Image (tube, grey):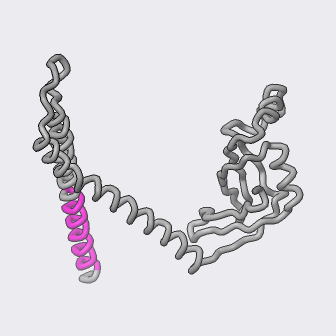
Amino acid sequence: MKNIIANLINLEKQVVRNKTKRILNKFINNLLAYILVIGIFTIAIGFGFRGKYKAPGELNKIIIITGVVIVLPFILYILYFYLIQKKKKIARTTDNIIQNPKKKDINLSEVKILSYNNKKIDYYDTFIGQSEIQSSKKQVNNVVIEIPFKNKKIEYSFNTTKNLQNLKIYFSLEQKTTLFIDNNGNIIYMDLVFLQ
């Protein structure tokens, strides 16, 4: 009974900490956004903007430099944060593939093409669909396929320059390919090198 009470107290402390962090993060983000807007307005004022119906004023270099000094750290922070997050995401995906390589060879005859260029496959059985296939020779086409995996079907999307008829031919000629899957059953990568 004491363990349950102690666990509930710890859980309540964590909830309070998380809520406090969320409120603090929201406050800081709003504060930074307001400072960024002030910096942008300062730059506009430095260029002489005085309003919609008033004639622009003279160029004021000191005000422009002040606005740039206010805005520049935000731009650098956003770029830095974006690059760091992108590197972390790539590292996580790569680590997941390297540490937990769930590979499965799949038979391409079991793969079903669901859509081609955001249109269902049934559309391409019509006359208009057939003429559209003939006209899409060198354009990039989005393809959604359905792959059977452990008694469920997973959808996977990729882009290719092959038209629908050629895609079906490539799938029948290649017959097998490799699928890399993470712990949650999501497809990380599907080996479609034969389409190049």
Q: Is residue 90 left or right of residue 125?
A: left
Up-down: is 193 above or below 100? above
Q: Nearer the viewer, residue 95 or 185?
A: 95
Quarter of the image containing the C terminus?
bottom right
Task: Give the image location of residue 176, x and y in percent.
Answer: 82, 65
Report x, y in % for residue 98.
58, 78
Question: In this orientation, which residue lies closer to the viewer: 70 or 34?
Answer: 70
Which quadrant would the N terminus be assigned to in this image? bottom left
Name the residue at 87% across, 51% down: 169
Magenta stretch, overall SS: helix
Q: Is residue 135 above or below residue 72?
A: above
In the image, the segment drawn in magenta is 4-23
Quick check: is 13 in the magenta stretch?
Answer: yes
**Residue at 74% from the left image edge and 68% from the top image edge:** 178
Q: Residue at x 72, y 53 (%)?
A: 146
Residue 97, given in percent of the width and then of the height, sits at 59, 74
Judged left or right of residue 115, residue 80 is left
Q: Residue furthest top?
A: 53
Q: Residue furthest bottom?
A: 2
Q: Quadrant of residue 154?
A: bottom right
What residue appears at the point 68 percent right and 43 percent down from the top-left corner? 140
Q: Nearer the viewer, residue 178 or 110?
A: 178
Task: Specify whether 35 is left or right of 100.
Answer: left
57 relative position to 116: left or right: left
- Give yes or no for residue 174 being in the magenta stretch: no
Is 80 rendered above or below residue 114?
below
